Image (cartoon, grey):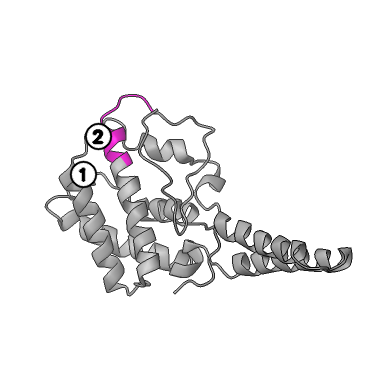
């Protein structure tokens, strides 16, 4: 289970506590600086011990194994088979590298000179995906994660499910359009332990 995650509120609290101690004491300037340095060290320590989702799941080998096993099942699936009928043999590698980068891993996807956030979105344009197909994609992938015994702690799974729901729903939305809403220079999405900050707002 991930430990010592720090939020912006945690940082403010640590600094506030340090400043409050200084203001309500008769410490000299040197002691004040020590308190503030201690608060900064505490924050850095907390952040250093928080792994990315990519690290927590076990790195690229585990993510490639997940999508490799998942896409082996897809052709025989009555709901997903038709969607991926023209799937290339290296499709699972491409998707694994995209997801790995989104979850905090190295730029295996966008760093190859061929792919970007825009190019991934482009694969869904005009496909007219259904919600049934979306839900089946998510559920089969999570079943595969269970079979491969990927981390199943509440924090990781809630973050993973959140990303899959977010990404798959955007894929369905993008599949109804004829123009790519993402520019070629748009940054890759990033997903961590808690990313949703407000309601959906279409561009």
Magenta span includes 173: yes
Image coordinates for residue 75, horizontal then vertical, percent = 19, 54
Q: Residues within 10 Å of mark 1 (few under 14, many from 20)?
A: some
Residue that appears at 19% across and 53% down: 136
Circle nearer the N terminus (1, 2): 1
The quadrant the N terminus occupies is bottom left
> Mark 1 near mark 2, Cβ–Cβ under 8 Å?
yes
Gap in Å between the C-alphas at discs 1 and 2? Answer: 9 Å
Residue 45, by quadrant, is bottom right
The quadrant the C terminus occupies is top left
Image height check: is 112 above or below 148? above
- Numbered label attached to residue 83: 1
Q: Report the residue marked by disc 2.
A: 127
Image height check: is 142 above or below 127? below
Label 2, secondary structure: give it: loop
Whether residue 52 is visible to the viewer of this picture, yes or no, is: yes
The magenta-colored residue range is 170-180
Magenta span includes 98: no
Residue that appears at 27% across and 30% down: 126
Image coordinates for residue 83, horizontal then vertical, percent = 21, 44
Image coordinates for residue 131, horizontal then vertical, percent = 18, 43
Residue that appears at 25% across and 30% down: 176
Give the residue furthest to the left.
Answer: 78
Whether residue 65 is visible to the viewer of this picture, yes or no, is: no
Image coordinates for residue 142, horizontal then vertical, percent = 27, 63
Label 1, secondary structure: give it: loop
């Amino acid at each position: 289970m991930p430990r010592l995650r720090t939020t912006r509120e945690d940082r403010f609290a640590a600094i506030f506590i340090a400043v409050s101690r200084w203001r309500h004491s008769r410490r000299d300037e040197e002691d004040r600086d020590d308190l503030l340095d201690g608060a900064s060290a505490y924050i850095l320590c907390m952040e250093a011990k928080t792994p990315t989702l990519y690290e927590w799941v076990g790195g690229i080998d585990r993510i490639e194994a997940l999508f490799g096993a998942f896409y082996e099942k897809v052709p025989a699936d009555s709901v997903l088979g038709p969607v991926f009928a023209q799937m290339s043999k290296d499709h699972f590698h491409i998707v694994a590298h995209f997801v790995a980068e989104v979850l905090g891993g190295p730029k295996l996807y966008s760093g190859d000179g061929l792919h970007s956030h825009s190019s991934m979105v482009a694969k869904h344009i005009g496909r007219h995906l259904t919600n049934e197909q979306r839900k089946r994609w998510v559920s089969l992938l999570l079943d595969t994660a269970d079979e491969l015994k990927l981390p199943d702690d509440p924090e990781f799974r809630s973050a993973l499910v959140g990303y899959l729901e977010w990404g798959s729903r955007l894929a369905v939305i993008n599949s109804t359009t004829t123009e790519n809403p993402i520019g070629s220079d748009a940054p890759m999405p990033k997903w961590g332990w808690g990313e949703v900050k407000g309601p959906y707002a279409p561009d």
